[in-house]
Structure formats: structure tokens, C-alpha cells
Amino acid sequence: QVQLVESGGGLVQAGESLRISCAASGRDFSAGSMGWYRQAPGKQREFVARITAGNTTNYGGSVKGRFTISRDNAKNTVYLQMNSLKPDDTAVYYCNMVAITESYWGQGTQVTVSS
């Protein structure tokens, strides 16, 4: 049973930074591709960032240059460092793990950016 638990969300002002985390258990974390997605009220879930088992990263266009994804295999944790936050970044952020053909999701953490 894979479990993904996000943490670190909260309320920040525009221009500030925030780091959210996702702790994984139940599967070989180091072999999985880890990603972050977000969903704002009334909108579809949107790709934010992904890091592969080989540490290749890619980002959604709206966050490129502001957000950084990283992973610590010793702690089974993936991070999303978010800088220069904007009100449009307000959403529930979900952690995703892809391992071979299976995909797992966390419960989400709320990030709210006030103007």
C-alpha cells in the first residue's frame, strides 16, 4: 500500500516563498518518478513539476523559473520550493508517484497566496 502525505501548505503573501513536501511509504521511492500537480477551484488539475528516478526535472510553463522540485531518496521525500508566489498559484497541491505502470496520489495540501 503506497501512501503519499503532503505537508507544508499555508497562507502566504504575493512575492513570498513556500516549500511543500511529500513523504512516501510503501514502495521503493528511489525507483519512482515523482510529481506535483495543482487544482484551483473550478479548474482542472494542472501539471506543476516532475522529477524522475534519474533526477531529470521538467516544469509546467506557468511555474518555470519560480518553482524547483527536488527529492531526497534517503528520506523518501520530494519537495517543491515555490518562490515569487502569485495569487494565481493558489490551489490544492497534490503529490504523485509513478512506478512502472501504477500511479498514486496524495490527499493534497492547500496553498493560498494573498495579493
Image (cartoon, helix red, strand yellow):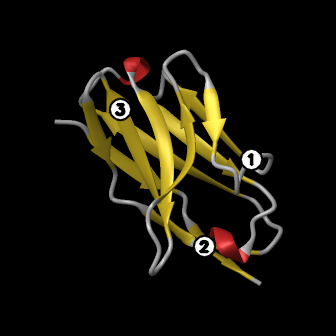
Q: Position of residue 107 (x, y in %)?
A: 33, 59
Q: Residues within 10 Å of mark 2 (few under 14, many from 20)?
A: many
Which of the numbered marks, if any, corresponds to residue 90?
2
Q: Position of residue 72 (x, y in %)?
A: 54, 27
Residue that mark 1 sits on: 64
Residue 85, quarter of the rendered image: bottom right
Which secondary structure, mark 1? Answer: loop
Label 2 vs 3, first from the N-terminus: 2
The C terminus - image quarter: bottom right
Q: Is residue 80 visible?
A: yes
The amino acid marked with disc number 1 is Lys
The amino acid marked with disc number 3 is Val
Assess whether mark 3 and mark 1 are in contact (beta carbons under 8 angstroms). no
Name of the residue lying farthest toward the left: 1
Which of the numbered marks, if any, corresponds to residue 98?
3
**Relative height, residue 87 to residue 27 (above, below):** below
Q: Is residue 105 toward the left or the right of residue 92 in the image?
A: left
Q: Residues within 10 Å of mark 3 (few under 14, many from 20)?
A: some
- Tell which of 87 and 78 is nearer to you: 87
Label 2 vs 1, first from the N-terminus: 1
Q: CA distance from mark 2 to mark 1?
A: 16 Å
Which secondary structure, mark 3? Answer: strand
- Tell which of 77 and 14 is nearer to you: 14
The amino acid marked with disc number 2 is Thr
Which residue is painted at 54% across and 58% down in the image? Answer: 8
Label 1 vs 3, first from the N-terminus: 1
Which secondary structure, mark 2? Answer: loop
Which residue is painted at 50% across and 47% down in the image? Answer: 36
Q: Is residue 111 visible?
A: no
Residue 27, quarter of the rendered image: top left
Q: CA distance from mark 1 to mark 3?
A: 22 Å
Q: CA distance from mark 2 to mark 3?
A: 25 Å
